[in-house]
Structures are given as C-alpha cells and as structure tokens.
Image (spheres, grey):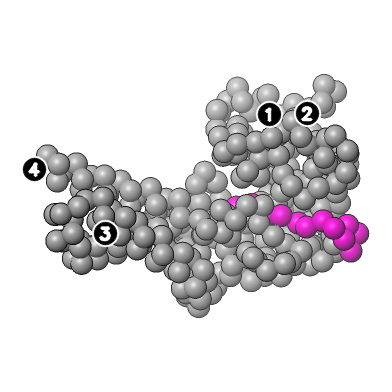
C-alpha cells in the first residue's frame, strides 16, 4: 500500500512539473501512464525495467510528435499563437533548440512578423549574423487566475503571446571576431554588468530581492571566459527594436540604456521584482 501511494504521489508530482515547464508534458505523461498501465500490465508484473522503457519510449515519441506536429496547428487555430522558426534556416533562430522542445517559442502572428522585419534588417547590415530568440510564450493561454494567461516560469509577464526575449551578441574573446554563439547554454545568466562609472541598478535591486538574479540559475552551464560582449551588434539590435512600429516597449538595464544612448519612450525599467535585463533584451507588442 505504501509503495502504491508513493508511486501515485511521484506520478502526480511529475505531471505537475512537466505541466509547469512545458505546458503539454503533464497531459502527455498522463495519457502515456494510463495507456502503459493498460497495455503493459503483464509485462510490468514480470519486468519493471522493460515496462519503464516502454513507458518512456511512448512518452518521448508522443511528446515530440505533439510538440512539432499537433501543438503548432492547435495553437494557431484555437489560440492565435504561432511557433517561431525552429530548424529552417532563417534570420530569426532559437538560441537553443530546448526552447522549442519545451514549447516556449510561441507568439502572436503580429509579433512574429515584427521579428522577421527586425531579422531582415539586421541581416542586411551583418550578413553572417542571426537574431537569436530566448523564451517567448507557451502555445495556449489557459487562464488560471483572474483571466491571466498560463505563466511561463520564471518570467512574470510572458503569458499573452505578446512578449519575447532576444539574445545579446558576443565576440570571440581571443580573436575579437563576431560570433553567433552564446556564452551560456540557455542564453541567460551572463550579465553585462555596470562599469565602475555607470549607474548600478542591479546592486540596488539585489538588496530588495534575490529574484533579480534568477537568470544565473537558468544558464545550465557556460563558457563565459571564451566570449566578450559585442556592444556594436547589440546596440544595433536595440536600434531596430526601437524603429519597429509594432514594438511598444522593451526592457533593458538602465546602465546599458545609458551606454547605448537610448532616448526612446519605448524603453521601460522593469522594476526590482523582475529579473535583471543585462543578459538579454525583453520586447513586447
């Protein structure tokens, strides 16, 4: 009885975690769990390891099929959200394929069009460079509380299809040549911190909330020592964001806003309760 109860608790916990981080993963695991229990009852009795392998194979196969075939069609039809490019060679690309595997690359069609315009203009000036996106939104809104969309943790506002984070650009530290590679696996957590003479907003906010540096826990792993910040290309990306008429606001740390001499009314300070924005730029309709 204890083993059955523990197993049930673990299954429910896994469903919750998969739902929180992928939105559809919990539902897929529930379907596979019920299906595997029905189809593999005799196998489970004889060999639990064989049963587990079958269940995991079913889960990963069904999950990937749902992620790249079913969900894009359903999200567009029912929720007016479209997937950003994944595998196709394009001027807008994910920083890591895991953003797409976790279903965190959905936006409203209007934002996708704006990103393509930004990418096209960026490529005209820097033909060998690609604009890389980070987290956007989940495919379905699924309002859970006060009509707020399904949260994309750890973000506080990526829930309506109108927001996306874009990567900064970097140089190979040894050669000082531009590169499309990023110093962290996820694209988050490598901060372009304030210089000694610059206004230090992160220092102020960190006294109020540990959450301000939550991005550093998302980098997974990094080779920061091999890269340096590319001010020129990042500055040009910000310029294109400002010029894009569909983009209504963007978040960037104050010291970078001053460093880039940004005077646009589209710039906003995100507040100390959000995560810091000197490792990426947040843009929204």
**What quarter of the picture does the C terminus occupy?**
bottom right
Report if the CB atoms under discs 4 and 2 are less than 8 Å apart.
no
Labels 1, 4: front one: 4
First in sequence: mark 4 or mark 2? 4
Residue 209 spot, x, y in % from top left: 56, 28
First in sequence: mark 2 or mark 3? 3
**C-alpha distance separating marks 2 and 3:** 50 Å
Q: Nearer the viewer, residue 257 or 89?
A: 89
**C-alpha distance separating marks 1 and 4:** 51 Å
Counting other residues with Cα less than 10 Å from the Cα at mark 2, is it few (<14), some (14-19), or many (20 or more)?
some
First in sequence: mark 2 or mark 1? 2
Question: Residue 175's image quarter?
Answer: top right
Q: Nearer the viewer, residue 79 or 183?
A: 183
First in sequence: mark 4 or mark 3? 4
Q: Which numbered dot is residue 33? A: 3
Residue 15 spot, x, y in % from top left: 33, 52
Residue 25 sits above or below residue 77 on the image: above
Mark 2 lies on a secondary structure that is loop
Labels 2, 3: front one: 3
Q: Nearer the viewer, residue 23 or 226?
A: 226
Q: Determine which residue is flagged by label 1.
A: 202
**What quarter of the picture does the N terminus occupy?**
top left
Q: Determine which residue is flagged by label 2.
A: 194
Query: Which residue: 67% across, 52% down?
Result: 95
- In the image as oriented, which residue stretches furthest toward the bottom? 77
Residue 278 spot, x, y in % from top left: 72, 38
Labels 4, 2: front one: 4
């Amino acid at each position: 009885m204890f083993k059955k109860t523990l197993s049930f608790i673990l299954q429910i916990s896994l469903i919750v975690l998969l739902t929180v981080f992928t939105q559809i993963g919990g539902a897929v695991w529930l379907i596979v769990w019920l299906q595997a229990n029905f189809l593999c009852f005799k196998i489970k009795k004889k060999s639990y390891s064989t049963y587990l392998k079958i269940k995991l194979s079913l889960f990963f196969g069904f999950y990937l099929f749902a992620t790249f075939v079913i969900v894009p069609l359903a999200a567009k039809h029912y929720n007016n959200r479209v997937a950003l490019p994944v595998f196709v060679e394009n001027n807008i690309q994910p920083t890591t394929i895991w953003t797409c595997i976790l279903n965190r690359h959905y936006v409203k069609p209007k934002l996708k069009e704006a990103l393509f315009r930004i990418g096209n203009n960026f490529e005209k000036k820097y033909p060998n460079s690609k604009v890389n996106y980070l987290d956007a939104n989940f495919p379905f809104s699924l309002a859970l509380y006060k009509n707020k969309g399904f949260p994309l943790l750890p973000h506080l506002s990526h829930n309506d299809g109108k927001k996306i984070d874009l990567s900064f650009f970097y140089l190979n530290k040894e050669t000082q040549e531009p590169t499309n590679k990023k110093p962290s696996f996820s694209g988050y957590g490598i901060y372009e911190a304030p210089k000694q003479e610059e206004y230090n907003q992160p220092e102020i906010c960190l006294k109020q909330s540990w959450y301000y540096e939550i991005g550093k826990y998302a980098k997974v792993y990094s080779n920061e020592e091999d890269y340096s910040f590319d001010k020129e290309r990042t500055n040009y990306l910000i310029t294109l964001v400002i010029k894009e008429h569909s983009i209504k606001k963007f978040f960037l740390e104050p010291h970078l806003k001053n460093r880039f001499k940004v005077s646009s009314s589209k710039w906003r300070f995100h507040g100390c309760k959000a995560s810091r924005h000197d490792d990426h730029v947040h843009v929204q309709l």
